[in-house]
Image (tube, rainbow, N blue to C red):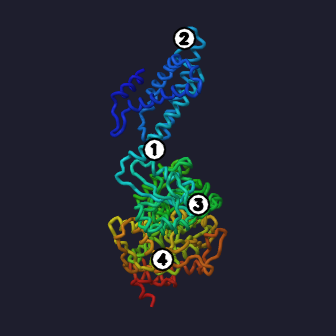
Amino acid sequence: MKKFLTSIALLFFGKRNSGSLSRIYVLAFDIFLVILAILIVPVIGYYPNYDAVNWQWYFMSMTSVLVYFIIGFIITGSYKGLVRYSGFRDIERISRTTIWVFFALCLSRFLINHYDGLKFLNNFFPFYLALFLTCIIALVLMVLGRLVIRRIYNEYLRPQPNKINVVIYGAGDAGPITQTALYQDTSTQYNVVSFVDDSNSKIGKAINGVKIRKPEAVLNKDFITKYRVDMIILAMPSLNIDKRNELVNKLLDLGVTVKSVPHVDSWINGDHLNFNQIQEIKIEDLLEREPIVLGKENVKHELEGKVVMVTGAAGSIGSEICRQVLQHHPKCLVMFDQAESPMYDLQFELNNEEPYKHIAVPKEFVVGNVKDINKLKETFEKFQPQIIYHAAAYKHVPLMENFPYEAVFVNVFGTKLIADMAIKYGVEKFVMISTDKAVNPTNVMGATKRIAEIYTQSRKSKTKFVTTRFGNVLGSNGSVIPLFKKQLAHGGPLTVTDRNIIRYFMTIPEACSLVLEAGAIGEDDDIFVFDMGKPVKIYDLASKMIKLSHMPDVQIEITGLRPGEKLYEELLATKENTIPTEHPKIMRAKVREYTEEEVNAEIAKLLEILPTCNDFEIVKQMKVIVPEFKSNNSVYQILDH
């Protein structure tokens, strides 16, 4: 009773949202619709013989219906929603109120019929059929009333300070759903000026009053200018990546914002699109390729129930390997890294975020350096790893060109320590993450990774050593895209070392899944290379990012090749230097074989030189170990003559 009286008080004296109807008016509107339903029932039921209606008894019996509805409205609060924003929840609440009222009226009618003490109320309650019809009609009127008011508000009454003219590319199922999603955005006024579709059977027709046109008629400067088009939305979620990228590149030249509807799998309940899900095209989207489908049986068999250790676990590659390894349910996952803050972030993510927090796998986080033999010994003795993914390394080419001592210490001797520990403690498999820059290296970083490859591949033991090589990964620490984003945030310019420089790109999850697969199928001494897809011209990449950022005044500055940098990366996978495997995207590299003795001897010489910190002597010995190491745009070029 207290809650009921409180609801009545709030109805008359409660605050209302600015610009919205008071709750008393919404309640009055619903009561009016119930009265309208009461009037409609006899019109339908007795048509055309209205003389047969006992109007006095009918209206008397319907007073109970009106009273029960008013009580139901107040108890359930169905009048509290903003009518102009009515959605499924509001309709659900009205339906629930109507159902409760119907059953309450039916129960009252039943009690009156079966208890003599209640017979005096007989004239105040209609029969069951009249109750049913009244409740159904009232429900339909209340739902339609809200939808009509919402449509009127959206079409004619909503403030339109920043009206955005939109073209929707795609007149299939996703097209009208996208249009509906736009109109549901209460913060922005969208005006769909045209649909575009390639199907001749749809050209000239209309969707919700908006004409469907062929691409040639819309995707030109004249149409864009005439209709003041601000945005084009791709509503073709099933379009393959190559065709989508080709289309987006054309749209970017029109100087409008380009957005895309996500795949149906990400829609709410699979059939409802929220306007917040319509995202602006990002440069990463344009560099995607058709997803590589991998069978998980090999990796699952390799990792399930095993103790897995990942070095460099807090880095962009190492952390993704950790995420994917967890999903194969190892016995324990040991994560080793020297970077304190990134390790904390990884620890928080895996312990607190979906889906990793629910994976019942012990997660061990170890802060340590791969150069520290004591810490490595303690870690191996404590956890006894069976599979190792070695991702710890220095990777930045120009920086390492200035610090050969550190590059060799970490990339060569850090790898040597981990590999030696793996042999000593009986690790089953050691998978090293290498780079395309180890192929005919032109810089210190690439040469150190090649020496690390040579050392691990020359080991003769029960431990299987597998190496994986791949190129640049999208979004990794220090890669070109985050750099361009920072430069755009500061207003430019974007710096490109050479107008013709090209690179191969792969997404981090894709690269890591291939690492796991290659590690699973790899035998001793295997070096695997990945199909990196088509090369990307960095200058074109910068141009597209400028268009996507809507900052046409930003310039591209050519800075010249950096020390050790190549103009063209080596093509990893060719018939001349690789052998196919069971997976079309993974190939075995054909490389020179070294004996353990000769490698040990040359590595020992490098170790003797290292404490001198003499960069030229260090690099000179590196070139002895890797004869194909020819420095490019570097002070060490004099050592090649």
Pick out the residue farthest to the top: 117
Q: CA distance from mark 2 to mark 3?
A: 82 Å
Which mark, by number, is residue 502? Answer: 4
Picture residue at 64% right of the left edge, 70% below the top: 584
Q: Residues within 10 Å of mark 1 (few under 14, many from 20)?
A: some
The amino acid at mark 3 is Gln
Q: CA distance from mark 1 to mark 2?
A: 46 Å
Relative depth, front residue between 45 and 292: 45
How far from the left and from the top, in percent, is residue 274?
Answer: 48, 50
The answer to whether residue 354 is visible is: yes
Marks 2,3: beta carbons within 8 A: no
Of badges 2 and 3, nearer the viewer stands 2
The disc, 1 or 2, on the residue closer to the chain's N-terminal end is: 2
How far from the left and from the top, in percent, is residue 472?
Answer: 49, 70
Q: Residues within 10 Å of mark 3 (few under 14, many from 20)?
A: many
Quarter that holds the C terminus = bottom left
Q: Which of the 4 quarters of the picture holds residue 576?
A: bottom right
The disc, 3 or 4, on the residue closer to the chain's N-terminal end is: 3
Of badges 3 and 4, nearer the viewer stands 4
Residue under label 3: 386
Q: Secondary structure at mark 4?
A: strand
Marks 1,2: beta carbons within 8 A: no
How far from the left and from the top, in percent, is residue 113?
Answer: 59, 14
The amino acid at mark 2 is Leu
Which mark, by number, is residue 118? Answer: 2
The disc, 4 or 1, on the residue closer to the chain's N-terminal end is: 1
Picture residue at 42% right of the left edge, 59% below the top: 342
Marks 4,2: beta carbons within 8 A: no
Residue under label 1: 151
Vertical side of 470 occupied by 342: above or below: above
Of badges 4 and 2, nearer the viewer stands 2
